[in-house]
Image (tube, rainbow, N blue to C red):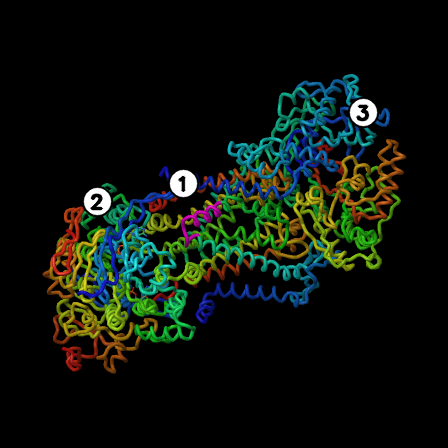
């Protein structure tokens, strides 16, 4: 059977260490290059090359590898090869784009061809999760070839054909150490435009599309050729505040804004109920550290108006609301509804739609984030440690400085004991809910549609993988 | 003026264009007085409602349906006409004035001025339009003014080229020579003798440009560079609504038709204007 | 012998924005084979339009032939289908237009443009047509024709282009040659050469010629018959000598009188015809020249005079006038 | 005639093309005016005739400094004009005017004829207020035989003769003493030519104007001009009093030219034979100079 | 002739330099690619190191002159995103762009020429009305809307043609039609007015007076001359198609240079922006040189001026 998967962005590079984009580059490369650990459709970690991994102490990880695994060219896929890969990404010469994931790794020791030990400079509980995004290159081959354009399979598939900017066609890798591939060919076809993607699915040209507008779900299901739906993603949508500028430096104002937005209404009306309203935190339920006890700010415009009056803040100036163009599912629509509801409580909101790069530049480079900005963030390890760190005092991304929150995060990081960490993040999320450095909106639904020729388990993160799919009976 | 209207009435298509355009402009001017729903505030619960008509002459609350956040499409089209026509008109005027003046300067002075300006035209042409727009908006930030600047920037060369050609032949005309002979200043010659004689071709270009710019706004909005939400413009509506093209056809269809009508009317008027000013088609002598 | 060309009641109109323009009104005349007709008249009097209308070359719209017959060798050209008319144009009737700058196609070589009618009408092979074209160029006085034939019009001076136009006009030895202000753009020396050429042609192949011009001198030298037009009508027509010596239309008289050569020492100034030409959208009811005519009678203003043989004049000398010019001149004290 | 010299041209040259700059396309050099010297006297009409392209218009345009001469000098009322800047020239612009051949192309189609005639006065800040200027425009219209009420109309509403009158009115607005008329009647109908020529003569009588009259029509030249200059390929080959030239042409080209004039008389015409002229064999030898052949009559030999 | 070509080439070089310079400075205003290249949570030090390794820590003028020098040698630098020479990235996408642009141009010009001719020769008749209304429609239809409609009809409804990609000739049909509609509309309108103008020229009357056959008159006297302005227009359109069919490429997932450059702008991949724009500009300039030469063939007056 043949399989075609629609991507919205082309594969830019075939070197898995030079890209951090899960949705396109890494998804395709994960078919070609193996990883130690895989994240299954249920978002739980599974073994791949590594059959077992244990935390020996707070800073030492021990991995057991499969025996006899090789790359297609016969190169051994052993502990030595893994060490070489970890050394490669940490090499400052290379400037690997994913180097920051491994900046805590201090030492990699090969114990035997199937045993590996990794030491970190401080506790790194999410290391195993991070490794699920780390693909392994054949060391020998890499020295002799340019991995940016050439590939040497070690995963279930190998490259048959590449059309730059358009498609990557894969075929089974006979030398793969794991379960044999189920599709004769797997094509990753780039279709940037949403309408085009859906049309391609309905026309039978592709078998899987993701990121479709929720309104299409019913229509696709009714077509009888495909199945559409949504699951909670790991991406959480918020209106981030720049708390360093007035009037958002005033906590009462921030709380007022949270009361002013009808999160439930947005989730229902704009997303046909497929989005999960946020529970007063930036974490969704699939994250480690999610706090199930928090309640969202109720939708109460009266209260909001009252709080604004009490806050004593000067609200006469227009408040700029930055929205990145075309990156989030129905983002512009959400922004307009939010702006309209904020207008209802008497604020003067001015939406500016920005090119994503310009937006990011404002956010991180010139550090002039607008008072309000639409932002959806996810952390690939699905761990509070990552996502919450983006709000930590002193962090570039934070635009918020709360010592209690910082202390709670530090406590969470200092331990690898899940119970300790859980408690710490409970505190952190409570502080964050109370201090409201953002309007917590909803968890973005991961929408999808796949043809009835295949089966697939939908997942909330960005991976799209053929080996998660099977030909339909 | 009497001749103008007499001829307009005689040319049925020209009259049609004129009436239609006048109507559009009137609607744009009086949009707030028409008692329509707010073009900005929507009713989330009424999102994507189809056009409602209880009878052929009995429109419901949303005669053209509602959009993706529950705003009345009719109201957005009507209010959108203000922004759209304003953008188009401003860009056309800006591009027209700059292009015409530079075209006159290039044609009149010739030599180095001409060469420099024509190289600028080359550069502008060699730089793909959309990319230029993308770069400028990305660099200057999106705003109403920048949008107009981009549109005008893509537009001036068309005037400059045509006007330059006209001026090249005009400056050899004897009345221009005669102006030199009485000692008129260069500025005077350009403004009093050259300019009035290139206004017709400039006007004809302008009618074509108006249509092109309205479409450009749509294409720019497609790349997220158009009018800022929630303000309505036709191009923006079209671009935002395209996602719903198969589930809610009315969101794109109606603004699309409006654009078509506008372009049609401007073109008809333009064609007629061209004929009207064509000396070969006028009663000569 | 039947005349070569017989025009009857030709009327041509143009619809313009300001209204219907009556360019040619009820023009009738006949032309014998071998005759040379010189046509003069006020600018806008319908000289060109009537000639173009004969062979179906006026732009329609806006032009329209309202009525009339143009019998050429007994066949009414106006009723002939375009397909058959094409066989006559360029073959039996040659045309030479005034403006040599715009009447030649700028992107085709001169030779090609001369060869076109030869190949089309005479079916000459490319080589033969070329040889004939070189011959024609030589005939119209172009030096080094074998080289010049491959050049483009822009490489020719105005006078040379005009000669090329003439070469095209006479390429197929037409029975009738119509030249519309063919020498107006030329200086007198070149003009003299071309007139000489036309005279030769008449002599050699007996071509019948219609020569439209403003220059009374040219008519005097070239034409057998002169025809004076005004306001879309023929005012006077007759043997050159007779008309020059004894004009019977006040307009002809005025024209001749305003020439500087006709000056007597006593005159301080050139004679000038008073008033200005008629508006052909609202032409005067009667004789179109009447409003400017000091000899006009009541009747002239009301009724269009017919073109009639002049009482005491030479045979064929006809004029359209209600008044008697010699008598009127005497009355008013002109010599 | 021993009247004072108004304009003196010595060794005037004008070449076109031939340069070809860095990016320019080199074109063959055209010597439109080739070492020409002559003078124009106060109150006279000097006729300039010659074959097409012989440099007549160029001479006229260079005289008015509409084109910069390649060499030579022009003196007007004793002042050197050549090399003056645009502003230094301005006072002289009042005194010298030009009228072109084509009355259609000479008027700005987008200007009322009144404004067009008024413009020179504005440029030179001649007459005080607008009302005064308007009055002067009306006066000028009267002078050239136009109804002053026409001032508000646009050129396309006028006939050829009327347009040429408007051009003349404009030229007269600055009360010039010298007018170059570059084929002012060629484009006109015979019956209108007479009107314009008469006007020229009237104005000369009333205002004491001096003309350089360029034309093809030699019978008109003979009627109108006091002296005639004959040009051939950029050079003046013969110059002298009109009657002397017509009665006793010296240069071969002049003879050819005169013999080619068609005479509007069938009897004369049937007798006339044009004399041919071949430039290559009959041109003046290199280094030829103007030689006197009669009183005030010179020929290039 | 040689001088003429040299002059043209120099002018072309100046235009390309202008384009490159404008793009260089404008794109630097966009901001900092490092924040886009590194994953979420990267530290300042990591960002700094990356910037240095990309050479973005140098003063802008130093960057400009060094990259200008490199560009003269054909080196546009290593793409930040693709990790290989930017020029390679661009050239790889060129064939797809060229094929699409070329077929759209040919198709559009053919349709436009036929339509324009029909309209001009049937002035005032129903045929003109129909053709010109269609042309107006073509010009007033936003490209993305047309593209989506074509997909919905031909791919989804009828299932005749593939909806996206560039693999086979079948893939080419819809995007080429989408672009050709606009091209043909412009050409039809221009050609019509050009033909009408030429039809009124004196030399066409001369040709008719010669008794030539209508097809001869049309081919040699009318069309030959009417084509001259059309050829200029084709040059401009070719340029627009080469770099500007971004929208069509996006809708049909066509792997062209236009979308590549747009993505490069969005990702602030300066070397690719620079290389892409330069390549498009160079091609454009050469097309126009070719058109200048073609002009000479069509119009001997221009040839004569050299
Ligand atoms: N295509 C046209 N459209 C409208 N009117 C026209 C057209 N062609 C000619 N006329 C008008 O027809 C009348 C006769 O014109 P025609 O060209 O025959 O004059 P003419 O006697 O040849 O004058 P001239 O001596 O100036 O050439 C004029 O009033 C002219 O304006
Ligand atoms: N601007 C110019 N550039 C190049 N050559 C020119 C220019 N103006 C005139 N010439 C050339 O100079 C020569 C003289 O031209 P000019 O117009 O003075 O002749 P003319 O005697 O007035 O002719 P005509 O009787 O045809 O008006 C011609 O060969 C002409 O081609
Ligand atoms: Mg005529
Ligand atoms: Mg001249």
Tell me whether circle 1 and circle 2 mark residues in contact (CB < 8 Å): no
Q: Which residue is mark 3?
A: A119
Q: Residue at x 18, y 58 (%)?
A: D239
Quadrant showing the N terminus of chain A: top right
Give the crowd class for mark 2: few <14, some 14-19, many >=20 residues within 10 Å: some
From the viewer's perspective, tell me whether residue B47 is left or right of residue B205: right
Dot in front, 1 or 2:
1
Residue D159 seen in render = no
Q: What residue span does the magenta drawing correspond to? A: B106-122
Residue at numbered disc 1: E7
Tags 3 and 2 touching, CB below 8 Å:
no
Q: Position of residue A333 (x, y in %)?
A: 71, 51
Q: Which residue is mark 2?
A: C145
Ligand 1 lies in which image quarter?
bottom left
Q: Is mark 1 within 8 Å of ligand 2?
A: no
Q: Is residue D205 magenta?
A: no
């Amino acid at each position: 059977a043949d399989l075609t998967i629609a991507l919205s962005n082309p594969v830019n590079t075939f070197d898995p260490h030079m890209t951090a984009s899960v949705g396109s580059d890494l998804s395709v490369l994960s078919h070609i290059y193996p990883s130690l650990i895989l994240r299954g459709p249920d978002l739980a970690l599974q073994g791949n090359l590594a059959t077992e991994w244990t935390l020996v102490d707070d800073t030492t990880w021990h991995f057991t590898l499969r025996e006899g695994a090789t790359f297609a060219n016969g190169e051994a896929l052993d502990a030595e090869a893994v060490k070489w890969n970890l050394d490669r990404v940490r090499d400052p010469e290379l400037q690997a784009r994913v180097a920051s994931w491994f900046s805590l790794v201090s030492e990699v020791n090969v114990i035997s061809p199937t045993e590996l030990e990794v030491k970190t400079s401080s506790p790194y509980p999410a290391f195993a999760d991070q490794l699920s995004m780390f693909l392994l290159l054949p060391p020998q081959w890499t020295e002799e070839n340019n991995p940016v354009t050439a590939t040497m399979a070690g995963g279930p598939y190998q490259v048959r054909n590449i059309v730059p900017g358009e498609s990557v066609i894969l075929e089974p890798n006979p030398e793969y150490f794991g379960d044999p591939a189920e599709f004769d060919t797997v094509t990753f076809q780039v279709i940037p435009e949403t309408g085009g993607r859906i049309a391609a699915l309905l026309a039978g040209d592709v078998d899987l599309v993701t990121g479709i507008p929720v309104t299409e779900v019913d229509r696709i299901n009714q077509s009888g050729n495909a199945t559409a739906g949504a699951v909670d993603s790991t991406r959480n949508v918020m209106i981030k505040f720049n708390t360093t500028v007035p009037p958002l430096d005033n906590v009462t104002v921030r709380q007022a804004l949270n009361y002013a937005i009808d999160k439930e209404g947005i989730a229902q009306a704009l997303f046909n109920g497929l989005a999960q309203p946020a529970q007063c935190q930036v974490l969704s339920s699939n994250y480690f550290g999610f706090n199930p006890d928090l309640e969202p700010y109720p939708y109460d415009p009266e209260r909001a108006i009252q709080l604004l009056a009490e806050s004593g803040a000067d609200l006469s100036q227009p408040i700029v609301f930055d929205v990145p163009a075309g990156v989030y599912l129905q983002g512009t629509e959400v922004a307009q509804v939010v702006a309209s509801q904020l207008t209802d409580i008497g604020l003067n909101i001015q939406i500016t739609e920005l090119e994503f790069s310009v937006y990011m530049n404002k956010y991180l480079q010139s550090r002039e984030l607008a008072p309000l900005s639409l932002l959806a963030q996810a952390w690939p390890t699905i761990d509070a440690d990552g996502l919450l760190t983006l709000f930590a005092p002193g962090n570039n991304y934070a635009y918020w400085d709360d010592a209690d929150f910082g202390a709670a995060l530090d406590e969470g990081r200092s331990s690898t004991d899940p119970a300790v960490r859980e408690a710490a993040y409970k505190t952190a999320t409570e502080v964050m809910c109370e201090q409201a450095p953002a309007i917590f909106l909803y968890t973005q639904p991961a929408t999808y549609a796949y043809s009835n020729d295949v089966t697939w388990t939908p997942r909330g993160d960005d991976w799209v993988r053929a080996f998660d799919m099977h030909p339909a009976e | 003026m009497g001749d103008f209207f007499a001829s307009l009435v005689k040319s049925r298509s020209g009259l049609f264009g004129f009436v239609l355009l006048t109507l559009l402009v009137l609607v744009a001017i009086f949009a707030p007085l028409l008692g329509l729903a707010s073009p900005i505030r929507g009713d989330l619960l009424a999102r994507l409602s189809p056009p409602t008509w209880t009878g052929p002459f009995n429109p419901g609350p949303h005669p053209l349906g509602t959009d993706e956040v529950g705003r009345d499409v009719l109201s957005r089209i009507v209010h959108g006409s203000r922004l759209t026509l304003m953008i188009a008109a401003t860009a056309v005027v800006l591009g027209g004035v700059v292009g015409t003046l530079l075209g006159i300067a290039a044609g009149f002075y010739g030599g180095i001025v001409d060469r420099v300006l024509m190289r600028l035209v080359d550069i502008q042409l060699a730089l793909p339009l959309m990319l230029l727009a993308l770069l400028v908006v990305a660099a200057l930030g999106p705003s109403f003014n920048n949008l107009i600047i981009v549109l005008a920037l893509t537009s001036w060369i068309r005037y400059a080229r045509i006007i330059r050609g006209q001026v090249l032949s005009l400056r050899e005309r004897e009345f221009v020579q005669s102006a030199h002979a009485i000692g008129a200043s260069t500025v005077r010659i350009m403004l009093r003798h050259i300019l009035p004689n290139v206004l017709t071709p400039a006007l004809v270009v302008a009618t074509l440009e108006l249509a092109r710019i309205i479409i450009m706004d749509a294409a720019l909005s497609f790349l997220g560079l158009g009018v800022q939400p929630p303000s309505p413009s036709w191009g923006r509506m079209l671009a935002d609504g395209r996602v719903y093209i198969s589930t809610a056809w009315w969101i794109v269809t109606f603004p699309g038709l409006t654009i078509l009508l506008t372009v049609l009317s401007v073109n008809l008027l333009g064609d007629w204007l061209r004929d009207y000013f064509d000396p070969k088609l006028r009663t000569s002598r | 012998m039947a005349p070569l060309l017989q025009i009857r009641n030709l009327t041509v109109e143009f619809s313009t924005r300001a209204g219907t323009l009556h360019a040619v009104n009820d023009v009738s005349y006949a032309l014998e084979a071998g005759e040379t007709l010189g046509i003069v008249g006020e600018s806008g009097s319908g000289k060109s339009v009537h000639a173009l209308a004969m062979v179906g070359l006026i732009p329609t719209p806006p032009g329209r032939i309202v009525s009339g017959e143009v019998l050429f060798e007994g066949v009414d050209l106006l009723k002939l289908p375009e397909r058959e008319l094409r066989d006559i144009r360029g073959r039996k009737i040659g045309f030479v237009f005034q403006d040599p700058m715009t009447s030649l196609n700028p992107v085709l070589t001169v030779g090609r443009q001369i060869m076109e009618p030869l190949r089309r009408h005479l079916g000459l092979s490319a080589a033969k047509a070329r040889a004939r074209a070189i011959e024609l160029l030589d005939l119209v006085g172009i030096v080094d024709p074998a080289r010049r034939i491959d050049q483009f019009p822009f490489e020719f001076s105005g006078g040379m282009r005009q000669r090329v136009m003439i070469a095209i006009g006479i390429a197929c030895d037409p029975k009738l040659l119509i030249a519309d202000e063919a020498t107006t753009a030329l200086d007198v020396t070149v003009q003299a050469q071309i007139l000489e050429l036309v005279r030769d042609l008449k002599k050699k192949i007996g071509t019948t010629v219609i020569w439209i011009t403003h220059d009374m001198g040219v008519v005097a030298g070239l034409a057998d018959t002169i025809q004076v037009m005004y306001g879309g009508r023929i005012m006077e027509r007759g043997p050159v000598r007779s008309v020059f010596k004894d004009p019977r239309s006040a307009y002809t008289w005025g024209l001749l009188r305003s020439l500087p050569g006709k000056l007597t020492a006593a005159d301080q100034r050139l004679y000038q015809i008073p008033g200005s030409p008629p508006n052909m959208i609202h032409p005067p009811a009667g004789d179109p020249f009447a409003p400017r005519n000091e000899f006009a009678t009541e009747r002239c203003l009301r009724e269009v005079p017919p073109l009639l043989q002049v009482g005491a004049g030479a045979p064929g000398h006809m004029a359209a006038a209600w008044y008697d010019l010699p008598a009127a001149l005497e009355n008013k004290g002109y010599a | 005639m021993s009247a004072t010299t108004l304009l003196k041209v010595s060794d005037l040259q004008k070449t076109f093309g031939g340069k070809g700059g860095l990016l320019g396309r080199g074109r063959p050099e055209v010597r439109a005016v080739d070492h020409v010297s002559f003078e124009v006297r106060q109150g006279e009409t000097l006729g300039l005739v010659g074959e097409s392209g012989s440099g007549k218009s160029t001479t006229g345009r260079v005289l008015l400094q509409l084109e910069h001469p390649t060499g030579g000098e022009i003196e007007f009322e004793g002042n050197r004009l050549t090399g003056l800047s645009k502003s230094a020239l301005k006072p002289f612009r009042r005194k010298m005017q030009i009228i072109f051949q084509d009355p259609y192309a000479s008027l700005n189609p987008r200007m009322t004829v009144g404004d067009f005639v008024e413009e020179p006065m504005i440029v030179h800040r001649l007459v005080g207020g607008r009302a005064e200027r308007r009055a002067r425009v009306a006066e000028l219209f009267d002078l050239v035989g136009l109804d002053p009420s026409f001032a508000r109309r646009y050129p396309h509403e006028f006939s050829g003769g009327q347009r040429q009158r408007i051009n003349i009115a404009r030229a007269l607005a600055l009360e010039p003493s010298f007018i170059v008329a570059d084929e002012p009647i060629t484009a006109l109908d015979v019956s209108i030519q007479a009107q314009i020529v008469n006007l020229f003569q009237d104005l000369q009588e009333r205002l004491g104007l001096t003309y350089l009259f360029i034309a093809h029509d030699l019978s008109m030249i003979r009627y109108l001009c006091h002296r005639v200059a004959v040009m051939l390929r950029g050079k003046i080959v013969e110059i002298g009093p009109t009657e002397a030239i017509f009665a006793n042409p010296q240069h071969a080209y002049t003879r050819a030219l005169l013999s080619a004039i068609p005479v509007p008389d069938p009897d004369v015409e049937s007798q006339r034979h044009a004399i041919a002229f071949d430039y290559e064999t009959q041109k003046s030898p290199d280094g030829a100079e103007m030689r006197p052949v009669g009183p005030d009559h010179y020929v290039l030999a | 002739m040689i001088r003429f070509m040299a002059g043209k080439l120099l002018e072309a070089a100046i235009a390309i330099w202008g384009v490159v310079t404008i793009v260089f400075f404008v794109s630097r205003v966009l901001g900092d690619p490092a924040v886009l290249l590194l994953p979420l949570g990267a530290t300042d030090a990591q960002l700094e190191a990356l910037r240095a390794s990309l050479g973005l820590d140098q003063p802008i003028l130093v960057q400009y002159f060094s990259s200008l020098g490199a560009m003269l040698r054909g080196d546009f630098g290593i793409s930040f995103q693709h990790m290989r020479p930017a020029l390679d990235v661009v050239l790889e996408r060129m064939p797809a762009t060229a094929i699409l642009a070329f077929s759209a141009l040919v198709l559009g010009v053919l349709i436009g020429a036929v339509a324009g001719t029909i309209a001009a020769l049937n002035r005032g008749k129903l045929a003109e009305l129909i053709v010109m209304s269609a042309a107006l429609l073509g010009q007033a239809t936003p490209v993305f809307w047309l593209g989506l409609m074509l997909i919905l009809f031909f791919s989804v409804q009828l299932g005749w043609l593939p909806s996206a990609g560039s693999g086979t000739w079948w893939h080419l049909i819809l995007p080429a039609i989408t672009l050709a509609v606009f091209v043909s509309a412009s050409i039809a309108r221009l050609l019509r007015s050009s033909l009408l103008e030429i039809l009124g020229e004196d030399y066409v009357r001369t040709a008719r007076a010669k008794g030539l056959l209508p097809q001869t008159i049309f081919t040699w006297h009318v069309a030959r001359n009417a084509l001259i302005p059309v050829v200029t227009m084709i040059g401009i359109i070719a340029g627009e198609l080469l770099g500007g069919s971004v929208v069509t490429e996006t809708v049909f997932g066509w792997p062209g240079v236009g979308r590549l450059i747009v993505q490069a702008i969005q990702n602030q991949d300066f070397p690719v922006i620079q290389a892409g724009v330069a390549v498009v500009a160079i091609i454009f300039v050469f097309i126009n040189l070719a058109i200048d030469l073609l002009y000479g063939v069509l119009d001997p007056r221009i040839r004569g001026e050299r």
